[in-house]
Amino acid sequence: MSSFTQRLTGAAKLNSRIYEEVEHDSSANGQAMGVVLLSAICAGIGGSSAGGVGGLIGLALAGLLGWLMWAAVIYLVGYKMLASRHTKTDMGQLLRTLGFAQAPGLLLILGALPLLGPLVGLVVRIWLLCAMVVAVRQALDYDSTLRAVVVVVLGFFAYALAFAVVYALLGISI
């Protein structure tokens, strides 16, 4: 079994073996949550929009809420609507793999670098999408990466719509 650091770097390297390992390790729930929290905090610091400690706490809570919502959307789209013949999963497996897929997000702290920040942000966000595809492919036991890409793309639109509805209900302008 890999250490937390090995899992973190393996997930960032898009190592499917690491995603399989965390998928089946129910004791890794806390680790996955830790990756989500660290990624959200790094994004806040790197984006210089954290607003102090209170802002970082808000970003961490938003990161956790987003993680839970993303897992629910992927469950509905990938497991209920687009399951393959081999697909089997549960929310714990999705939460763990999708949590570790946030590992590249730790580099968002570099967004604070003058001139390089926007480029780093773009590269890391593309990397995060790739990590999501690997996480979905492994958690849903897909044979096809293309199916995982479709689930992530459809899931993204459903996720964005859900957030827009929540923001509208709360009266928050985007």
Image (tube, rainbow, N blue to C red):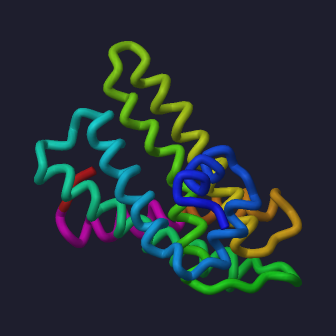
Q: Is residue 169 magenta?
A: yes
- Which residue occupies 40% across, 50% down? 39
118 left or right of 52 in image: right
Quarter placement of the N terminus: bottom right
In percent of width and height, residue 36 lies at 42, 59
Q: Main secondary structure of the magenta part?
A: helix
Q: Toward which corner of the image does residue 82 lie, by quadrant?
A: bottom right
- Which residue occupies 45% across, 60% down? 160
Residue 63 sits above or below residue 9 on the image: below
In percent of width and height, residue 135 lies at 66, 62
53 left or right of 123 in image: left
In percent of width and height, residue 50 lies at 20, 43
Numbered-mark total = 0
74 left or right of 115 in image: right
Residue lying at the far top of the rendered structure:
115
- Which residue occupies 44% across, 43% down? 106
**Stretch in magenta:** 158-171
13 left or right of 167 in image: right
In percent of width and height, residue 163 lies at 37, 65
- Which residue occupies 79% across, 82% down? 87
Pick the residue in front: 151 or 92: 92
Q: Toward which corner of the image does residue 43 lie, by quadrant?
A: top left
Pick the residue in front: 19 or 79: 19
Q: Is residue 140 magenta?
A: no
Pick the residue in front: 7 or 123: 7
Pick the residue in front: 30 or 44: 30
